[in-house]
Structure formats: C-alpha cells, structure tokens
Amino acid sequence: MKEIKCAFCKGKGIDPFELLSPLSTCTVCGGTGKVTIEEPYVRCAFCHRTGVYPNSRLSCTVCAGKGVIGFKDPKTTCPDCKGSGREHTTTLPCIRCGGIGVVRKEEGDSPKPTNKRNFPESSNHGKEKVTEKSEVA
Ligand SMILES: [Zn+2]
Ligand SMILES: [Zn+2]
Ligand SMILES: [Zn+2]
C-alpha cells in the first residue's frame, strides 16, 4: 500500500466544489488530503487522474476519486477504447476495461472476447475478482 495525494481535492482535504460549504470535507479522503492505494497502480484514464467524474462535480466512479487504480496483473492498452477509458459514442466508462484504459494482458491479446479460457463470464463485468490464492503454500 502506498499513500498518495488525494486527486479529488488535490491534497487539500476539502471538497473542491464546495458543494455544502467552502470548508466541506473531501468525501474521497475524509479530509486528510491523502489516500492509500495498492501498488502497482495505473492512472485512471476516464478522469485523466483528476479524480473528478467528467462534466460533473462528483468523484470519479472508476477510481473512486483517487485518480489511480491498483492493477497488479500484466496489462495492455484496452483494445476497445484505445486507452481513453470511454465508450466511443457516450461519455460513460468503457465497458471492457471499466474506464481505466488498460486490461489484463492476456485479455487484450485474445482477438475476440468469445475466447474465454479460464475466465468464466461474470455478471459484474470489469470488477470481477480473480482468486489468486494459488501461490500460498
Ligand atoms: Zn480529498
Ligand atoms: Zn477516475
Ligand atoms: Zn476500455
């Protein structure tokens, strides 16, 4: 885990949009100005690491306002959004990568998503948890 500056409030600890009052506590970091993130991590493509959901005053739903997302698997640029993190015709996060702009390398390498090897179809696409307990002796 690493402590980084809160992207949403830029480390100030107060709500950047002063929705309630100029001294409103930042909802992302709880007022500390810092957030913790698991390493390694990637920058959030969807909000351009600002932590702000584009064209809104809310924290980014992709990175939860942190601006970065923990991503420890080998990664490659998302073939669907070309790394932009957005759907082509909408302003919504890319379904394939969930908005982070990268996918697991083996996923990006497979030409068609129909080629499911050992990844069973998950109902909540993009947020599925892969069990990686095999290394524990
Ligand atoms: Zn903050
Ligand atoms: Zn984001
Ligand atoms: Zn994508």
Image (cartoon, helix red, strand yellow):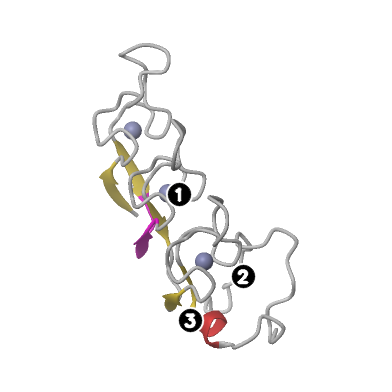
- Badge 2, how many Cα within 10 Å: few under 14, some, many 20+? few
Task: Determine the image quadrant of residue 65.
Answer: top left
* Image: magenta residue range: 37-44
Q: For this view, does 123 lie left or right of residue 58?
A: right
Q: Residue at x 40, y 58 (%)?
A: 45
Q: Secondary structure at mark 3?
A: helix
Compare residues 40 and 100 and report the one nearer the observer: 100
Q: Ligand 1 sits in which quadrant?
A: top left
Q: CA distance from mark 2 to mark 1?
A: 21 Å
Q: For this view, does 88 lie left or right of residue 22?
A: right
Counting from the top left corner in percent of width and height, residue 5 is at 26, 42
Residue position for label 1: 63
Q: For this view, does 120 lie left or right of residue 28?
A: right
Above or below, comparing residue 61 to residue 56 in the picture: below
- Is 71 covered by the magenta stretch? no
Closer to the chain start, of discs 3 and 2, is: 3
Counting from the top left corner in percent of width and height, residue 100 is at 46, 60
Counting from the top left corner in percent of width and height, residue 88 is at 54, 62
Q: Does any atom of ligand 3 lie closer than 8 Å to the CB of label 3? A: no
- Badge 3, how many Cα within 10 Å: few under 14, some, many 20+? some
Q: Secondary structure at mark 2?
A: loop
Residue 105, numbered circle: 3
Q: Residue at x 30, y 40 (%)?
A: 6
Which of discs 3 and 2 lies nearer the camera? The answer is 3
Closer to the chain start, of discs 2 and 1, is: 1
Above or below, comparing residue 30 to residue 43 in the picture: above
Residue position for label 2: 131
Q: Residue at x 35, y 55 (%)?
A: 1
Q: Could you tell me the amino acid type at mark 1?
A: Cys
Q: Does any atom of ligand 2 lie closer than 8 Å to the CB of label 1? A: yes
